[in-house]
Amino acid sequence: MSDDYDAIVLGAGAAGLMCAARAGQRGLRVLVLEKADKPGRKILISGGGRCNFTNIGAGPANYLSANPHFAKSALARYTPRDFLALVESYGIAWHEKTLGQLFCDGSAQHIVDLLLAECAKGDVTIRCAQEVDQVTRTDGFCVATRIGRYTAPRLVIATGGPSIPKMGATGFAYDLARQFGLKVVEPRPALVPLTLGGEDVLFRELSGVAAPVEAHAGKTSFAEAALFTHRGLSGPAILQVSSYWKHGEPVAIDFLPQHSQDWLLEAKRGNPRSSLRGLLRDQLPQRLADTLADRIGLNGDLGNASDKALRAAQDRLRRWLFHPNGSEGFAKAEVTAGGISTAELSSQTMEAKKVPGLYAIGEAVDVTGWLGGYNFQWAWASGVACAEALDRVP
């Protein structure tokens, strides 16, 4: 089987389908090749099956990249409200959760169906169960799979990163990029639970306990929930800082971010017969409160404690240091940080500067969003930016 197309998109995920749909609707003959047996598999499991399809406040500051300016152009040209308008045009009911996160009221299947309908409008050909064996370039690009050979003057890498390998994710995008001489920023798991060892292993006994905290890694902090697990730390606040955490560095947690700096001293003066354990139980789950109180070791009434001891307790609760010994890896990572270097690509078109006709979009690129719909918005925006450039002659 051999066919000629104007553009071949490798990967039928969020970015690939969006790019293909828009390119097809611009008059190009587009082929999408997908390794899995059906398109949009990662979309279907996202957001607990309801797909957190964008974040209404998404902007360049919500992304991690070696070049923090790279995402600006695409994000400005295709905004969260643009995708929301598309969602509403299909009558898909949605709701906003915390921090601007938009979800389907029903199933994530609605978003996959939307993308497939958009592809159908552009007469896009989608072929699944097509594992790529080889990609070569002469006048254009030739993609050989175990089923056929396909050629086109334009090739789009939209195969994502290696996060969630049980869904078939691999580092194929990086191998292909390197084949064509493009640099790759070392990939690492992002939005991933962190594991604890050493003295911190005692906190594993709190598995299942969650609390609102402010988590810090380096100069970055997020105020959301943290969850203790049988392996370490998880929950939205931890997943967020995991993208910024570097091995060997601590993660600091403020267990009472809403409290004033001298809240214990104020409590001592207002109610000297109160105790640290009791105050913590009023604010945190009992098991967590008791563990923190035991570790601090400040027993008895506050009125009997020195101001110095209370300040030390305040400081520790404000910046409780955990020392992760690693993460749960790509198996549990929601996305991949790193990827095809943005220095190799045009921020306007997503085209490789040194390889005319070759493009990279979505998670395959070194642009990683926060938890909460930001990575989907990058998929939509980068896909559209690429699609609008594909009808130009390479």
Image (cartoon, rainbow, N blue to C red):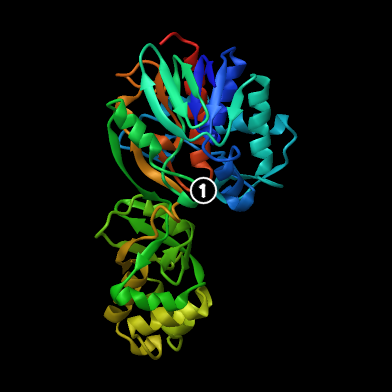
The quadrant the N terminus occupies is: top right
Q: Position of residue 225 (x, y in %)?
A: 49, 61
Front residue of 21/349: it is 21
Q: Position of residue 243 (x, y in %)?
A: 37, 50
The quadrant the C terminus occupies is: top left
Left or right of residue 2, residue 171 in this image: left
| Vertical position of residue 109 compared to residue 133: above or below | below
Residue at 72% across, 29% down? 89
- Farthest residue toward the top? 393
Front residue of 259/13: it is 13
Label 1: how many Cα within 10 Å (few below 14, some 14–19, many 20+): few
Residue at 45% across, 50% down? 165
| Vertical position of residue 332 compared to residue 143: above or below | below
Q: Secondary structure at mark 1?
A: helix
**Residue 266 visible:** no
Residue at 40% across, 14% down? 140
**Where is residue 367, by image quadrant?**
top left
Q: Position of residue 247 (x, y in %)?
A: 27, 57
Left or right of residue 87, residue 289 in this image: left
Q: Amino acid at mark 1?
A: Met
| Vertical position of residue 381 compared to residue 205: above or below | above
Residue picked out by circle 1:
167
Front residue of 51/304: it is 51
